[in-house]
Each structure stands twice: as structure tokens, then as C-alpha cells.
Amino acid sequence: MRLQRDGHEVAVLLTGTRLLDDTGSPGGLVLFLEEVTHLLRVQRMEAWREVARRIAHEIKNPLTPIQLSAQRLRRRYAGQLRDGGAVFDECTRTIVQQVEELKALVNEFSTFARMPAGQHTPHDLNALVEEALVLFREGHRELDFVFTPEPDLPELELDREGVKRAVINVLDNAVAACAGRRTVAPGERGRVELRTTYVSRLGIVRLEIADNGDGMTAEVKARLFEPYFSTKREGTGLGLAIVSAIVADHNGFIRARDNLPRGSRFIMEFPVRQQAAQLAARARLGAYGA
Ligand SMILES: Nc1ncnc2c1ncn2[C@@H]1O[C@H](COP(=O)(O)OP(=O)(O)OP(=O)(O)O)[C@@H](O)[C@H]1O
Ligand SMILES: [Mg+2]
């Protein structure tokens, strides 16, 4: 069953149990409503990854022999053929090139299928975000990037490369959203705001990335994290699927919301290890003489 909550569609599993009184006659009904949006997303993601794994496996093996054979033919006969030499050259070149493209496609598939594979070690999320941001600040001087790091951030067990990649993917989208704005007030610059917060009550660290682009329609919001969903001409639609897989690998959550007054906001939440949380709390209380 699908319901609307705060303007978002959520999937709900409804189960009911009939209550019987002592005499065995119906005494009422207990209905359970359980939100399973996240579960369905994870299931869809797993199904896609399985498909990607199989396709990658089936296609990859014959590619190298095809390419090597075409190259060998070129080496052996290219100089000898007089009639039809040009055709031979063009055909073998096409085979080699197309196989190269297929290989790139399959690699993309298998990267997605293998994701995420990184090691989890203690890291400072703020530093990681800064590292990713440097590239964007330099590459997009027409935009304002504003990062507000939480000063008391506990260390997180992170797959460093994975999380950096996730931040880059979300930033890529934010930049594209700013660049693609249809309605811009005079002098209004594209703006991407990043913020980390430590919610000690919930034992999580939150990373928010918000832009002032055109925002998302309800349809886009519902399908954002699906592999191969893209509204861009050149997009693969794997960006957010990869982000979502990386966040899930950290037992975290990601969600997308409207940014006010305009644009989109991506919110990633990572659980803090108990020990790290305690150390951070003690440091704040001055337990180490701070
Ligand atoms: N910040 C954003 N603002 C508006 N729409 C967004 C934003 N981020 C993502 N989207 C929408 O979600 C879609 C899926 O994003 P995703 O990153 O998965 O793929 P993509 O950006 O289209 O392609 P790729 O990441 O491979 O270049 C985008 O095509 C876009 O429609
Ligand atoms: Mg993208």
C-alpha cells in the first residue's frame, strides 16, 4: 500500500490480526502499519546489483579475445590487402573501438555490482568533505560553496574512498542543478551549502548537502536512488545509486528533501561507534582536563 507523508510517497505494509473473545466470537481487529520504503529500495537495489553482476560476468570474458583477434588481423593483413584494404581497415578498427566501449560499459556495471568493497577505518568526516570540496571550489568559481563543519565531530568508521566518492557524486548533482536553473533572480549566484552535525541523542553524524537549483519533481524524488534513473542527456543515472549503496554499507541512511526556499537537500546519516561517541562526550565534558 502506498501513502503520502509530508508530500512524500511511502510504502506501507499493512497486516491485521482478528481478536477473538473467550467464547471464540470476534472481539475486534488489530492493524499494524509498518513503513517499508527503505526495505523496498534495498531490495530493488540488490536485484539490480545481481543483474549487473551477471551481465558483467557474461560479457567480460569474450571481449578480450575479440579485441586481440581483430588487432591480430590488422597486423597480419592490413599491409597485404590491395582490393578492399580500406574496408578491412575500417571494419577491424570499428571492432577494436566498439569492444573498447563495451569494456568501459562492463567495467561500470561491475564497479556498481561490486560496490561497496572498501575497508572501514577511523576518519574525520569533516576533513574528508573538505578534500572533496577543494576540487569543486577550484573547478566552479561561479558558485558559492559554504561548508559549516561541526567542531565536535566524533571519528567515524569510514570507507574513505567510498565516502569521498559519495560526497563527490552528490556535489556533482548539486553543481548540475545550480547550472541548470531555469529561473534566476538577477545577481543570484548558485550556492551549495554543506553542514555536518553530531546528533548525540541518536548516536549519528549527519551530513547535509543543499543547493539552490530548481529542485525535484515528485516523480524524480520517488526514483532518485534507482540505478539508471536519470533526467540528464549524458547521465548514467548511477551516481545516486552508488551513493546509496555506500551509505547503506555504513549502516547509514540517505534521503532527499526540498531545500527552502528553493533547491534540493541531500541528508546522509552515519551511525557513530559507541566508543567514539563516549570519547567525544568525555572530551566535551573536559574529562581529559580540556
Ligand atoms: N541536487 C539535485 N537537484 C535536482 N535534481 C537532482 C539532484 N540530484 C539528483 N537529481 C535528479 O536525480 C537524477 C539521478 O541522479 P544520479 O546522480 O543518480 O544520476 P545522474 O546525475 O543523472 O547521472 P550521473 O550521476 O551518472 O552523471 C538526476 O538525473 C536528476 O534528475
Ligand atoms: Mg549524478
Image: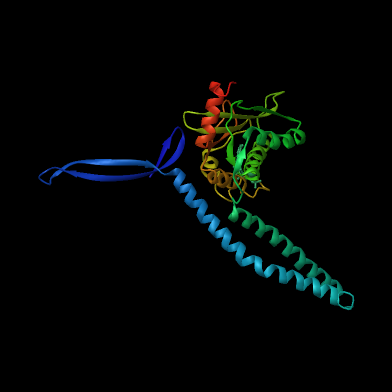
- The N terminus lies in quadrant: top left
Q: Residue at x 67, y 34 (%)?
A: 127
Task: Classify residue 140 by image quadrant.
Answer: top right
Q: In this view of the protein, can residue 181 be seen by the observer?
A: no
Q: Looking at the image, how many numbered discs can be counted on the residues? A: 0
* Front-lying residue, 189 or 182: 189
In screen coordinates, is 86 left or right of 212? right
Q: Residue at x 62, y 35 (%)?
A: 125
Residue 277 against residue 230 in the figure, above or below: above
Q: Position of residue 15 (x, y in %)?
A: 31, 46
Q: Position of residue 255 (x, y in %)?
A: 52, 38
Q: How is the image coloured?
A: rainbow
- The C terminus lies in quadrant: top right
* Front-lying residue, 170 or 22: 22
Q: Position of residue 266 (x, y in %)?
A: 57, 35
Q: Residue at x 70, y 26 (%)?
A: 189
Residue lying furthest left: 23
Task: Classify residue 108 by image quadrant.
Answer: bottom right
Q: Position of residue 239 (x, y in %)?
A: 62, 46
* Image-quarter location of ligand 1: top right
Q: Residue at x 77, y 34 (%)?
A: 138
* Front-lying residue, 253 or 145: 253
Q: In this view of the protein, can residue 13 be seen by the observer?
A: yes
